[in-house]
Image (spheres, rainbow, N blue to C red):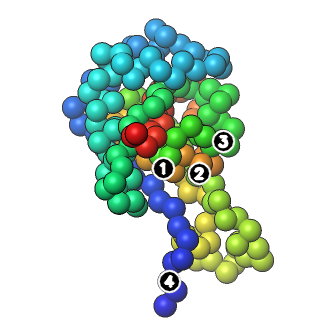
């Protein structure tokens, strides 16, 4: 039996009770497409209050499955993304927190792809060695983007988004840090 000795993981939730239409309206009205993001406003903007509370609770659940209860985590940044923004379609990491999350108030296509941070371990792996990919053999993992879906992951796990060019997909991204 193989014992996993290093690992990372994501949490996926389908949220209920979030007023998606208000959030979609806000992001479209405050479009920052391909511009530098304002990462503070939505943390205190009333339209996002319910979502922010749920996301912070779920991020804490994720964090406490990995770490002890000495600390909680708190949202430190949040911003909206519209469609295929340049900043989300390139592989990137988030350097300002410990746990990140992405929520989709509207998404009907595309996905969020995570890249294996230990890709060197896949050396000499051939396609015909694999019937079904598993955590030891996967170069990447893609999570379909769907309305109401929340995805939580380690901030420095490299990832990028893809959707159809004409898609109206909207995502809200968050970074959470250790609560002092
Ligand atoms: Fe990101």
Q: Residue furthest right?
A: 124
Image marks 4 and 2: residues in contact by CB distance under 8 Å: no
**Residue sitting at x 63%, y 19%:** 36
Q: Which residue is mark 1?
A: 153
Q: Residue furthest front?
A: 180
Q: Nearer the viewer, residue 32 or 127?
A: 32
Image marks 4 and 3: residues in contact by CB distance under 8 Å: no
In space, the residues marked 3 and 1 are separated at their CA atoms by 13 Å
* Sequence-earlier tag: 4 or 1: 4
Instruction: Name the image quarter holding the C terminus.
Output: top left
Q: Nearer the viewer, residue 153 or 96?
A: 96
For the question of whether residue 173 can be seen, the reply is: yes
Image marks 2 and 1: residues in contact by CB distance under 8 Å: yes
Is 119 displayed left or right of 11 in the figure? right
Placement of 9 over or under 122, stated as above or below: above
In space, the residues marked 4 and 2 are separated at their CA atoms by 22 Å
In space, the residues marked 4 and 3 are separated at their CA atoms by 29 Å
* Sequence-earlier tag: 3 or 2: 3
In space, the residues marked 3 and 2 are separated at their CA atoms by 8 Å
Q: Residue furthest left?
A: 17
Q: Quadrant of residue 179?
A: top left
For the question of whether residue 103 can be seen, the reply is: no
Q: Which residue is mark 2?
A: 157
Q: Quadrant of residue 66?
A: bottom left
**Residue sitting at x 62%, y 77%:** 130
Q: Position of residue 102 (x, y in %)?
A: 45, 38
How many other residues sit within 10 Å of disc 1, few (<14), some (14-19) or many (≥20)? many
Q: Which residue is mark 3?
A: 92
Residue 3 numbered tag: 4
How many other residues sit within 10 Å of disc 3, few (<14), some (14-19) or many (≥20)? some
**Residue sitting at x 62%, y 34%:** 88
**Disc 1 element:** strand
């Amino acid at each position: 039996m193989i014992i996993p000795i290093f690992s990372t993981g994501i949490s996926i939730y389908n949220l209920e009770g979030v007023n998606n239409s208000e959030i979609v309206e806000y992001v479209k009205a405050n479009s920052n497409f391909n511009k530098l993001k304002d990462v503070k406003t939505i943390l205190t903007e009333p339209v996002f209050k319910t979502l922010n509370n749920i996301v912070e609770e779920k991020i804490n659940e994720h964090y406490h499955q990995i770490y002890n209860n000495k600390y909680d985590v708190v949202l430190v940044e949040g911003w909206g993304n519209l469609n295929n923004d340049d900043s989300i379609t390139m592989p990137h990491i988030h350097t300002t927190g410990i746990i990140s999350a992405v929520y989709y108030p509207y998404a009907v296509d595309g996905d969020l792809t995570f890249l294996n941070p230990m890709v060197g371990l896949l050396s000499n792996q051939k396609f015909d060695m694999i019937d079904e990919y598993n955590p030891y053999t996967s170069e990447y993992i893609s999570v379909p983007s769907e309305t109401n879906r929340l995805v939580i992951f380690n901030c420095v796990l490299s990832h990028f988004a893809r959707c159809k060019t004409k898609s109206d997909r909207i995502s809200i991204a968050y970074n959470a840090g250790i609560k002092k």
